[in-house]
Amino acid sequence: MRMPVPLACALIAGLAGAAPLHALDVGDADAVREAYLDHIDADADADPGDICVAADPQFPETAIVAGFAHDRGCMVETILVDDDWLAPTMASEPALELAGWDDADAARRAELAMAWTRFAVFAFRTAVSTANDDFARPDAPAFTAPTTEPDGADGVVVTLWVQEEAGMLPETEYNLWELTFDRDGAMVRIRVLATYVAEY
């Protein structure tokens, strides 16, 4: 059936004016900040400087967005994945899929799970790869380097020490985290196995 000319012209005009897919460059932090402020319908006087943004070439079309607080640093609020604003706990499956999770073997899935943990889950915090001076103190727990293990069902379990953002007290807090990713890349469990506070 032949489409009426006015309707055809209207459809073409609409398509021409539509935003292309992946129009936002996640590597452009200023563009991500602006898009986020639009997304939350922020006041015109909102300060983009209070928004922290991180991107990683390993995770296409993905950006981490955090709010800044002077006493806690940057705290993750949302994650942009493939033009969708997602809660941090819901973002791993689509982001890992874009990174090649579905076709990856066990070794590659372990690498991706660790990379996502460092980049997204603990963005703006410090994953401790080797024991620092705090772990040499007499009251310190035994230090273990970051590890990945299969969960027995094509998923991955990640364990690592994380140095939390410094607060106002003369101390540094470390948590030993365990995160489980299922066969689809969804983060299905996250828990703290141990906490260590180094006081000064």
Image: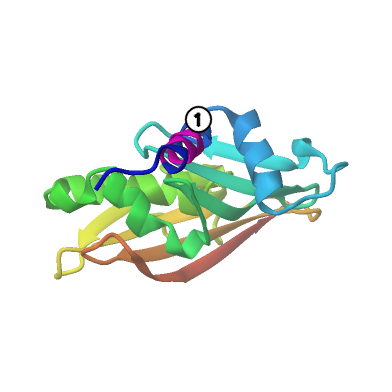
Q: Is residue 88 left or right of residue 145?
A: right
Q: Position of residue 89 (x, y in %)?
A: 47, 64
Which of 95/156 is in front? 95
* Number of marks in picture: 1
Q: Is residue 169 left or right of residue 146?
A: right
Name which residue lies at 26% across and 67% down: 182
Residue extending furthest right?
45
Amino acid type of the residue that numbered disc 1 sits on in the rendered structure: Asp
Quick one: label 1, few (<14), some, or many (20+) residues within 10 Å? some
Q: Is residue 9 magenta?
A: yes
Where is mark 1, residue-wise? 25
Q: Is residue 76 magenta?
A: no
Color style of the picture? rainbow
Q: Is residue 103 left or right of residue 127?
A: left
Name which residue lies at 48% across and 31% down: 16
Q: Which secondary structure is most common in the magenta stretch?
A: helix
Name which residue lies at 70% across and 49% down: 67
Which of 153/200 is in front? 153
Label 1, secondary structure: give it: loop
Q: Position of residue 105 (x, y in %)?
A: 11, 49
Q: Is residue 140 visible?
A: no
Q: Is residue 96 visible?
A: yes
Q: Position of residue 78 (x, y in %)?
A: 57, 54
The vertical placement of 182 against 44, above or below, is below
The vertical placement of 68 against 31, above or below, is below
Q: Position of residue 155 (x, y in %)?
A: 21, 63
Quadrant of residue 21 in the image? Answer: top left
Which of 2/158 is in front? 2
Magenta range: 8-14
Which of 39/138 is in front? 39
